[in-house]
Image (cartoon, rainbow, N blue to C red):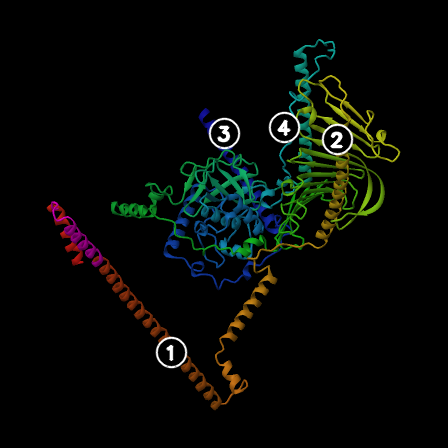
Amino acid sequence: MEALEEEEEAEEQREEEELKALEISDNLQDVEEEVSVAQACVPSDVPDFDWSSIDTSQLPSSYKTNSLKEKKLLHMADHFLRQYTHLCPDRKPLFLHPVNECGVEKFVSTTVRSTLLPYAELYDWDGCASFVSDYLTMEPLKSPITPPSSLYSPTTILKYQRGNCFDFSVLLCSMLIGARYDAYCVHGYATREICTLDETLEPCPLLRRPQERQVPKEGTRKKSNKYRVKPLLDPQSKYELQQEAKKKAETEAAQKNKEREEEKVTEVEKRERDPLHGLRVHAWVLVLPGRREVPESFFINPFTGKSHSTTDERFLGIESVWNHRNYWVNMQDCRNGCKDLTFDLGDATRWEVMLSESEKALQLLPGAEEVKELSDSDTDEMQEKEEKDMSFDMPPSWVAPIQISPRDFETYGSQGSKVILYKKAKLEKWVPYLNENGLVKRLTVYADSDYAEVVEVTEWFKNRKDMLDMREVNKQTQVTTEYFSPGHLFHLKAHTYTSLEPETERTMEFYHKARVDDLQQRVETANEMTEYFVGRDDFLHLRHTKFGERGKKVHLAGTKTDIDSRLVVQIKECFHRNLEKPADEDVAERIFLITEEEIHLTYHLKDKCITASKKHFFKAAGRDRKGKIVMTPETCITYKAGSPEKEEKLLPQYKLLKELMEEEKKLKQHVQQSKAEVLNILKTRENEETNVELSVSIYDTERNKKRYEAMTTRKDELLEQEGRDLDYLAPFHIQTGHGEKMTKGQALCVKDDCLMDLKQSLIRKANIMQAHFEKAVEDTQKNQNRLIAGKEDDFLARHSETTSLVHSLELGLNREKQTAPQKSRAPKEKLRKDSRLAKHLGHN
């Protein structure tokens, strides 16, 4: 009895589950019908495009037909799809072989064409993703809950610069695989915001600035004075203080969480609940680790070009993935989205592969053995066929090579512009040289979600001759900040102002290494001007000037503007420490009180001293009746720290005062020159903004039309001049006096004259060559005769020297015989040597 009751309960539960399943399927059918009728996913701002009107006549034959290998692959895909639908009847059909632009079925893996484009920006995944998202225009799917019935080639998508999420993904995956990434196209489900490219709830990535450094509480307090009277301690429990701090932190965290929840609720309330949540079809790209130093798997949304974690809640499930080599079906549970998915495509329990590389046969449908009994020979044949199928390789892609010209690569959009709406922000992009002022990007920040009240506007520029890079305008405070690249006329780096009118608050930053005076920053108000210097030889790092009432206009030599001579009241200069001087002789600060006729000097602090040495000069106290300065003890008051008071001599003080008075005159001129430079900068900036000029590379012949035209005209002139120089018949035309048209006889006469002249010129050249040859032969004969004569002269000279030597020897012998007949004769050896020498000389 108990068994029967359990079976009845089980049957009742099955019936209830079947009824629920039928209700769910009916609801899904109703939703599909509503969507197909209303087309709720189609945004109104996307223009329609008739894909049926595209020209396919010029496409290659691979677009219009299938090879034998492709047909076999389609047959295998159908077989795989039948198995899949039989084993997983509750799942939706796979996206396997949609038709292309020519109406021919193509397997999705063969639509991926591995391509590495010759641009450095497209070698990394972020460059490829940003290019695809900017270059193409997004088109929504016709039905948001079913994949498209067609998948066009990446070449056609690039040609017309538009497509749906599957088109985006195939193109991006082709580029990533060509860049050696392990990338895959993904067919899955995502939220409405991802599928419809709605980023109105996402913060703009350009607004994500790095967090300001928090100053640590410890170590920032000033050192307490040991002589300060310590207050009485308030006895408190450390435990109570910790508990109070903990409670305070918890209340603050709860308040923040409450505010965040309220913001989320308000944002969610603004949006209607999506009736198709979890059913919206989307395609994106999966990048797995192992290549190009990718540490972990991540998703790329092709519509935005942004990367997402595989645990992102906005991606709700995956049906299948594919690349140019294979196709995998996800067999994992996607109730929690993609959080719990494992992307080990080699795991057969989680991913069902279509072209398996293992030796196992394809899984047969249950009950297939009962349909027909096969003999042993038939089973052997089937196994051989299956083994052949297992060794089947993916055919090459039918897509033509993907190519992007440099001109198309620079356009980044069919219309040359793109607008993206973020949370309380709007980002606009333009192609370079599209705007006359060089504007390429603008970010507008709003105070509300309706994009009505503007808070801040940031603009980016390119190719400007004034080197302007970026401009930030705060609409609430009306403060404008401009940033410049190196190379500006006045070496400007940044300029912050409220108005370009003079004598208003502004801050100018300069590239100090490019300036002679090493000026880094100049801060100006209506009555003050402060200049900051870096790396000066005189160790000056600050100059502060105060102005008084306005005087008459003064024209400085070397400047183009007249300066409103505001009265200079005070000039203050600060110096860094010069270690080559003693501290009490190294000036740290000097103040020129011009209207009060005083000069204050403050020296650097000496070691083991708490006060610095000072000198105060009073020019008014030392003037005589004629106005000349006479040095008196009251003219200079000196305080020297760390040494006994001694009266200094007046002569060194007088010399120092004279030097300071000369410095004061120079400083006044420097201040006037600084004011003149400010006025010149303001006028230059007004002219640059009024007449914006863009720089064009000399190699850019398309945009640099003036230079290109000048080069072509110059080339034509040179060719014409060369043609005139090579006109051999021109002299004969002049001699004969014929005009442009000639008769046959005149032409023959000119021909004969020309040939005769050519013959005469050849004869002249031959005569010249013969004359040069004869002269060379004559010179050669002369040189030979000169050599022979020189040898004969040398022989005669040597012969005369030899005969004279022999004669002198004979005379010597005879003299010895006559003068010394009785003496003993010379040794025989000596006589022999002399006779030998004589014979030798005689022989020579």
x and y percent of residue 213 in the render?
Answer: 64, 29
Q: Which of marks 1 and 4 is nearer the N terminus?
A: 4
What is the CA distance from the residue labelled 4 to the residue labelled 3? 102 Å
Q: Is residue 792 above or below residue 491?
A: below
Q: What residue type is labelled 4?
A: Glu
* Quadrant of the image containing the N terminus: top left
Q: Nearer the viewer, mark 1 or mark 4?
A: 1
Q: Which mark is residue 767?
A: 1
Question: In the rendered view, does 370 fall on the left or right side of 617?
Answer: left
Q: Are marks 4 and 2 in contact (CB under 8 Å)?
A: no
- For the record, the magenta segment spans 803-825
Q: Which amino acid does label 2 sit on?
A: Leu
Badge 2 is on which residue? 656
Question: Dot 4, crowdedness within 10 Å: few (<14), some or many (≥20)?
Answer: few
Badge 4 is on which residue? 580
Helix, strand or loop status at disc 4: loop
Q: Do the residues labelled 1 and 4 touch (CB within 8 Å)?
A: no
Q: Which amino acid does label 1 sit on?
A: Asn
What is the CA distance from the residue labelled 4 to the residue labelled 2? 19 Å
Q: Nearer the viewer, residue 155 or 478?
A: 478
Helix, strand or loop status at disc 2: helix
Q: Which of 520 and 842 is in front in this view?
A: 842
Identified at 37% across, 77% down, the residue is: 766
